[in-house]
Amino acid sequence: MITNPDLQLGLTKAEKKTLRKRLDREPNTLEWAMVDAQWSEHCSYKSSKPVLNQLPTKAKHVLLGPGYDAGVVDVGDGYIVTFHIESHNHPSAIDPYGGSATGIGGVVRDILSLGTRPIALLDSLRFGDIKTSLNSKWLFKNVVKGIADYGNCIGVPTVGGEVGFDKSFEKNILVDVVCVGLGKKEDLVLGEAKHSGDTVILMGGSTGRDGIHGVTFASKVLSDESESERSAVQIPNPFLKKLIIEATLEAVHTGYVRGLKDLGGGGLTCGISEIAEKGKNGIDIEISKIFLREDNMTPVETLISESQERMLFVIKQGHEKDIQKIFDKYELPYAKIGIVKDNDKITIKDGKIVIARLPVETIVNAPIINRSVKIPNYLNKLRKLEPPKEPMDFTKILRKLLSSPTLASKRWIYEQYDHEVGIKTIVKPGQSGAAVLKLDNGKFLAIKVDGNPKHCYLDPYNGAAGGLAEASRNIISVGGQPLAMVDHCQFGDPNNSEVFWTFSEAVHGMADYCKALNLPCVGGKVSFYNEDTGTNTAIKPSPIVSVIGLIDQLSNIRTMELKEHGDIIIELGITKPEMGGSEYYEYVHNFTGGLVPKVNFITEGKIQKLVLELIKKGLADSVNDCSEGGLALALVEMSILGGKGINIDLNNVISECNRIDDVLFSESHSRMIISTNRNYVNKILDLARNYGVPCSIIGTVKNDDISINISKKEIISLTLADISKVWGDVIPKCMGEVN
Amino acid sequence: MTSLNRYTVNIIIENKPLIRDPEGETILRDLIIKNGVTEVTKVKTAKLLKLEVNAKDKENAKKIMEKMCNDLRIFNPVVSICKISVSSDI
Amino acid sequence: MKIAVAVFPGSNCDRDTFNVLKNNLRIDTDLIWHKESNLDNYDAIILPGGFTYGDYLRGGVIAAFSPIMKQVKKMAEKGKPVLGICNGFQTLVEAGLLPGALMSNISLKFICKWTKLKVENNGTAFTNICVQNSILNMPIAHQQGRFFIKDKYLNHLIDNNQIVLTYVNNKGKISNDINPNGSIMNIAGISNEEGNVMGLMPHPERASEPALTPLRSADGLLIFKSMLNYLKKA
């Protein structure tokens, strides 16, 4: 029934030659398949490693950086936070419910495999146009349901996220999920087989033919044949995952778990090879011990299967029974499948017969591919395009902008996510720019996921650096000091030198930001091949980033809703005419072109420090950052959430713009809005001057309407009641749910 | 004008045979077997849609239903199969 | 005084409930695995929220047959306080300790939001320190929270004062548009005739800390404190 996997190897001619050379013999079928899985782009990062090396990964508080299942950050008092990002784009495009659900399963397993309890999830999603495309609507609805059903069932709150809509994602949606875990330093377990003689136990779901060639599936471009590739579809089983979470954490607390790894892409092959390599040991595996779900599975199928919910445990020799007792309590299947050996080989046995033997170094180190780069032709043309005409009726324009699903209220989504389980969620979805969780040591963790493919398309360097700047500003806006980031680079076919150029530029931008702002990268992923042969379109370059930050006490947490009538609204930073990739141009004018907001690292650093100090000194009541939708959206959000109107004079906004729409909707970086009691204004102006941050009073909190003026002339007038309804109903209307 | 007859159509949507059914497996293991009904060896979950359809004859009714299930994505062919049965009993 | 919090395969809110009792209220509390056969030493038991057995077939139905439920029934018969929160409420209903049925939300979607609840009966083991007709803030998070009961039995509930909590609006009035799941008469929580067994869909353990609750209300604590008060008086 399954076609001979031999016919579907993804290895190139050169790679086959390298393998033969390294082994100094012809590999057998099983060995070919194992290396094929491990050397796939998805598992080996063969194209991206040279580029990713630019990202800074070290800091005092970073215990573990990229290269492990998740990054580990020290948050003080003996506690650690683990952090990872994953995606399931291709499976979700075909089975949105199962694909997104199992995506959650995958990222949670990564957090779990370090011995920490998953405490929060975030999702970052991209779809086509849900206003006009039935297919996009179907994908959106089912992806959200998949994430909801899975996350809710395992009891991990989904506390935040972001969604964007753009035609380029019509066929290639993006489903990124971030997971954060919490644990004690002493419970940290690494994915390594360090002690020879230790037992390797496989636990959890049984092994079947699911996902065979899943990693090569992700490493190939989607074509019409994909719909029939049923072996790449994975069925979620969150109940099983929940049992695995509890059993694993109980096992870790015994102290006898010396290595832990979840099985994901590349199945057992990758899992075993990676723990062997990290532990600098070999491993012997007895294939007959692996518990299977289907009949007549070949050794190849067994070793590359991507069946869900499987974990590898490396147990201290002699203590297997202590761990098995726990697995029995939860009625979880398991088997002793191997032993750690004091050699450098992965040896697969069937009974006494050795059916494969590969040096660890050979499997794990795929030959690096140096891809060529070429600046895309479209870039220069787009940057120089004549901008759209300035509109006359700004009230109408703002209403139109607020009806963009990308900017509208996401309540339709987050009310389907249990965001309260765990009783840690202090700042809840929809309340502010970032979510805030209570940690067990009295401190608070802010988390945010962000990315701007529209910016990246026009300028990958600034678009990617900008994604980090925006995520960091969101962390700042709730009072958090950014600690670390993870990134997920999603691009088209790396064989296309223009695509690879955008990837290199994006990573370069992120690396420069991280170096300048002292933000270490503790992990991440790269997913290529996000394009479709039918239309020959790649997705817009999509580096998605997640940033975590620490807040040391409850009183330093802020949210964005306007608090009191009479409060003063202050704008920090300079608004520049950088309209390229803005939601205003793209959604209101259907226009792609212009210059993308540049990130000035020094300016960005200053404003972040200033705002944190203002918060700590109790001088800022409500804080929001300016990003998509510009100043206008930032103000409207604060107004709608607080249920309080605003009166703004645009003349007071510090800007280099000649046009009114540029001032309102530019997405320039390094800008934030705060509202505060009028008694604090002078102190704020002083502090801003000290920092060298441009600062200006632009309005007051008053009444029930949004009034934006230029001197005495009102150019935008909206009632709160009206605009709240418009903004709140966008997505429910698209989904056919409003009367 | 051809006269139309009324048919009852049952559309059963279930996971493809080789695809897992965690719900069915859990019901079998944790509810049925654990509580002593060991005669049961397998449980599959499915969704049943019961429709009333006007058509020329049974074949026609089935054809219409098949097209509908495919066009309107009543089932996702990647994950599920769709069994259509038509009867003239109302 | 010793309180048991049951843990079934798939329970999620057991540790939350345990933490509120143990750390906020400083009560001697134990997490009890569902296979436990003796609860004689416990004065009350709480069935927490979650997705026992993945909510497969129906929420709470597989858990209702768990070994521990025999003990729960014994405790209920003895008049000890038994509380079912969310999935725990579903389990009590499936086990026959409370009447009615909990069906899928009318919107067919999972819903997580804060609701206002009216105390319809402050005479139960879990509401005796609440003010009659007062409004409490508590969050819901469920897919199958629509309470349903046939007319005849609904009349019993009303006559016996078994409706304990209802979903109300800001003004304390029952209305259709704030009914989050289509529950008959906006019912959010009910008790047995004796008033010692109660089930509610909202999560009091999630409303027990000011920093986590809107308006810093922490109304959830009233449910647990009422239980302690009931035990003290018994």
Image (cartoon, rainbow, N blue to C red):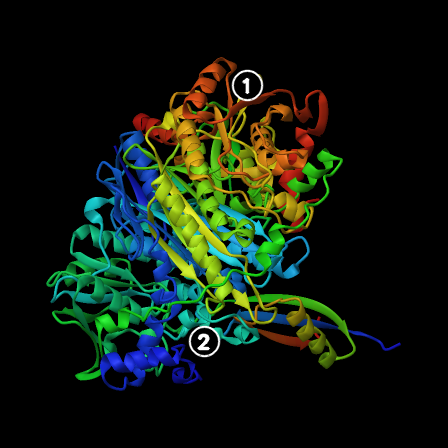
Residue A248 % position (x, y): 26, 55
Residue A567 — which label? 1
C176 versus C122 height, above or below: below
Q: Amino acid at mark 1?
A: Asp
Q: Quadrant of the N terminus of chain C?
A: top left
Please identify the quarter of the rendering in which residue A728 is found: top right
Disc 2: which residue: B18
Q: Amino acid at mark 2?
A: Leu
- State the CA–CA distance, disc 1 to disc 2: 63 Å
A61 versus C52 height, above or below: above
The residue at 69%/74% (across/down) is: B67
Observer-nearest of C127 and A599: A599
**Residue A508 appears left or right of A187:** right
Observer-nearest of B41 and A7: A7
**Residue C84 appears left or right of C145:** left
Outermost residue toward the top?
A679
Mark 2 falls within which chain?
B
